[in-house]
Image (spheres, helix red, strand yellow):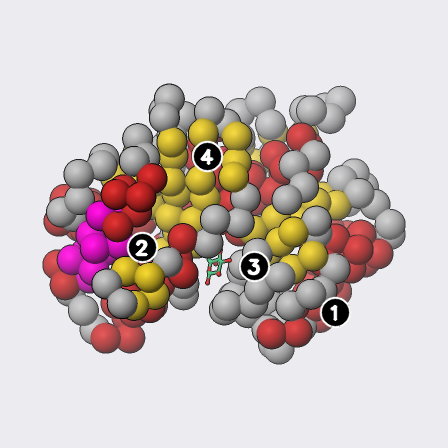
Amino acid sequence: MSARGQAFGIDIGGSGVKGALVDLATGDLVHERIKKATPHPATPSAVAETVAELVAESAWDGPVGLTLPSVVVNGVARTAANIDPSWIDNDARQLFSQALGGREVVVLNDADAAGLAEDRYGAARDTEGLVILLTFGTGIGSALLHRGELVPNSELGHIEVHGKEAEHRAASSVKERKGWSYRKWSSQVSKVLITLENLFQPAVFVVGGGISRDADHWIPLLANRTPVVAAHLRNTAGIVGAAMAVDSGIAP
Ligand code: BGC
């Protein structure tokens, strides 16, 4: 942990780039989130410029953790399922470090960051066994954690469930696009959860993403056997997890 027990996290999403300084003793933000609109097209150089503006506004001059909705290996983005394809094979760590005056940065998958945060401070805090976090949004993100250790880049949203990719079956964007009720959508989510619990035997599923705000409407409708709990940190999990990652040097 840094001398002050604080680190800066930035969550890069399809609509917003959000960042804040995080108190690592509690997982709380030290100040209100700074939010910028994601540039369009969200190319690496345009996003790096937005990140630089955000950090300049904060006056933070230490290391920065950042999330991307991509597989990230050694700081390099390897996939771009729901973001600009020009991210593929981009050395995001180098890009952001340069944009931030050469400082130390860590880049990791957005759901992995949320998983780290929920595992340490949130919904999975007291869980002994395997934790699977799933974020429901445009796609489905995933994080696998065991006793605080992250298995990075699990990408369970792309697993095939009864002949169809999980995120094409049950992302919250599918519910919106098709105008489904919670009952109809949750039957698709159940299929995904049953497939995953048969493969991994998790102790708990933590569900995040905007739709987890309405978790009371749909968690009770799920038909799988593993307990499902709503994420606690909601819209700060990515920021907090990114700050944790740069603080502990996790660099998938
Ligand atoms: C991507 C993941 C990402 C998730 C949530 C998926 O389409 O493949 O890398 O974590 O969306 O943004």
Residue drawn at x 56%, y 39% is 241
Proximity of marks 3 and 1: CB atoms separated by less than 8 Å: no
Report the side of 212 relative to 247 (left or right): left
Sequence-earlier tag: 2 or 1: 1
Task: Give the magenta-colored segment's residue range.
Answer: 185-194
Tag 1: Cα neighbours inside 10 Å, few (<14), some, or many (≥20)? some
Task: Examine the residues drawn in magenta and state their main secondary structure.
Answer: helix
Q: Does the magenta stretch include residue 147?
A: no
Tag 4: Cα neighbours inside 10 Å, few (<14), some, or many (≥20)? many
Q: What element carries label 1?
A: helix
Q: Position of residue 26 (x, y in %)?
A: 53, 25
Residue at which label 3 appears: 70
Q: Which amino acid does label 3 sit on?
A: Ser
Residue placed furthest toward the bottom: 41
Q: What residue type is labelled 1?
A: Ser
* Cα gap from disc 3 to disc 1, whole angstroms: 16 Å
Camera-side residue of 28 and 161: 161
Residue at which label 4 appears: 145
Sequence-earlier tag: 2 or 3: 3
